[in-house]
Each structure stands twice: as structure tokens, then as C-alpha cells.
Amino acid sequence: MSEIAENIKDICSRIQKAAERGRRGADEVKLVAVTKTVDAERVNEAIRSGIRSIGENRVQEAEEKFKLITERVEKHLVGHLQTNKAKKAVQLFDFIQSVDRERIAQEISRRAKDLGKAMEILVEVNTSGEETKFGVHPDKALPFIETISKLEGIKIKGLMTVGLFSENPEEVRPCFKKLKKLFEKIKSANLPNVEMKFLSMGMTNDFEVAIEEGSNMVRIGTGIFGPRG
Ligand SMILES: *Cc1c(COP(=O)(O)O)cnc(C)c1O
């Protein structure tokens, strides 16, 4: 078995155990393999080893790479999106996970309408309070979603966060708790055009804690492909 295949197997069994601790099934947790800086050959190898969703953080890199990916997999944009790249992003991706301001939501909406597409998006929330992080403030998330839910061409499908930058996953747990609470609050608001389906939280260092706290979508790069060069 290749190293990538072994890593995927290991991650999947850890996802399963964490899901059990959270009293859920492993099939309720979607694994998105984050392929930024990973060449197409290794991405294809991951796909041959069972990966069905991939995530990129830069539109330009994704555009080049996707030409070399032959299998149909679900494609997620997980990185910050600039308005001048919105059109490309709408063309290339199935999900945009990083919507965090009205201007970009409007631009995605406009481009999606032009292309006759309903773009599935997640709203990125800054749960750590770190200034270097993107995302809407947790207190602003509900009014933000109310506003952008009126735009055509987009479908709001959930929330995403990048937790506190820390080696110790226990320090990140409060970020995940906060996002889960917000997720439930927005869900119970029952807004038109808003389906709180995906709670995207957890990366290589903290995905088990994230799943324990209710994540149903983890984004894993290093754990599958090794350290980025
Ligand atoms: C890079 C990245 C990941 C994956 O990080 P790893 O620690 O390598 O698993 C997940 N989410 C986002 C938004 C990223 O930019």
C-alpha cells in the first residue's frame, strides 16, 4: 500500500473512533483532502485510494491542477477569495467554504447567475478572535446570513472555521463548541434559502476534537500528504 493510501486509512479509522465518541456514525463525517501545494499526480493517487472530496486554497493553483484530475470528485475552495477571482471560483468549485463578507457574496451571486449555477457556500466564522484569521465575528454571523440569504445564485449550506492556532487540540475545543452552538442557533432560525447542513471544522492537528464537538466535515492536508514543502 502506498504511503498516501496508508495515511488515508489511518485518518479514516481515527475519524470513525472520534465519531463513536461523539455518538455518531463515521459516515456522517465528510473527509475533504486538502491538496494545496500537492501535485496532481499525488492528488490522483489519493483519489485512487478512496478520496471523494478535495480542497484547494488558491483559485489559480486549482485551475492548473484540476485540468490534470480526471476523476469526478467534489471540489471545495477553503481559502480566502478575492472578488476578482469570484468568476473562476464559481466555475471551478462545487463548494466555496470561505464566504465572510457581503461584497464577496454579492460577486459570487452575480457570477453564479451569469453561469446559470446555484453555488453552494459555507460562511466562514472567526471563532478564535485572532486578527490574522478570516471570517465573520460570531455575533455577526446570523445577521450576515440573513442578509446574504436574499441573494440569488447562492445556497447557504453551513458554517466553516479555522480554529485557534495551537499545537494542543484541547485549546481549540472552545472554538469548535462556539461554532456548533452558532450552527444550532442559525438552524433553528429557519431562514429561507439557508440549510445548516455542513459544519466544517477540524484539520490535521485537531480534527478528532472537532468531530467530538459536532463537526461533520473535516479538512485534512498534512495528515494525508505529509508536511508541505
Ligand atoms: C491548509 C488548510 C487545511 C488543512 O490543514 P492541515 O493542517 O494540513 O490538515 C484546512 N483548512 C484550511 C482552510 C486550510 O487552509
Image: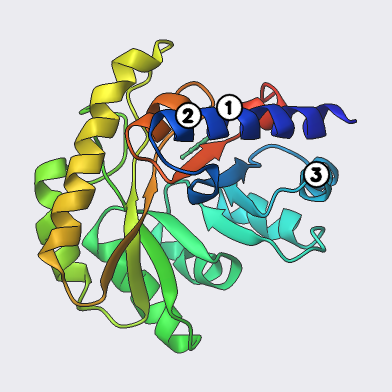
Image coordinates for residue 4, horizontal then vertical, percent: 79, 32
> Which residue is most to the top?
168
Q: Residue 40 location, x and y as percent?
A: 80, 47
Residue receiving disc 2 = 18
Label 1: which secondary element: helix
Q: Mark 1 and mark 3 in contact (Cβ < 8 Å)?
A: no
Residue topped by disc 1: 14
Crowd class of label 3 (few under 14; some 14 to 19; many from 20; radius 10 Å)? some
Q: Dot 3 lies on which element?
A: loop
Cα gap from disc 2 to disc 3, whole angstroms: 21 Å
Whether label 1 lies within 8 Å of ligand 1 gets the answer no
Q: Is residue 7 shown above or below 41?
A: above
The residue singled out by tag 3 in the image is: 49
Give the total of numbered labels: 3
Residue at 72 percent across and 32 percent down: it is 9
Q: Are marks 1 and 2 in contact (CB under 8 Å)?
A: yes
Where, quadrant-wise, is the N terminus in this rendering? top right
Q: Does 34 appear above or below 110?
A: above
Which mark is in front, 2 or 3?
2
Residue 130 can be seen, yes or no? no
Q: Nearer the viewer, residue 198 or 108?
A: 198
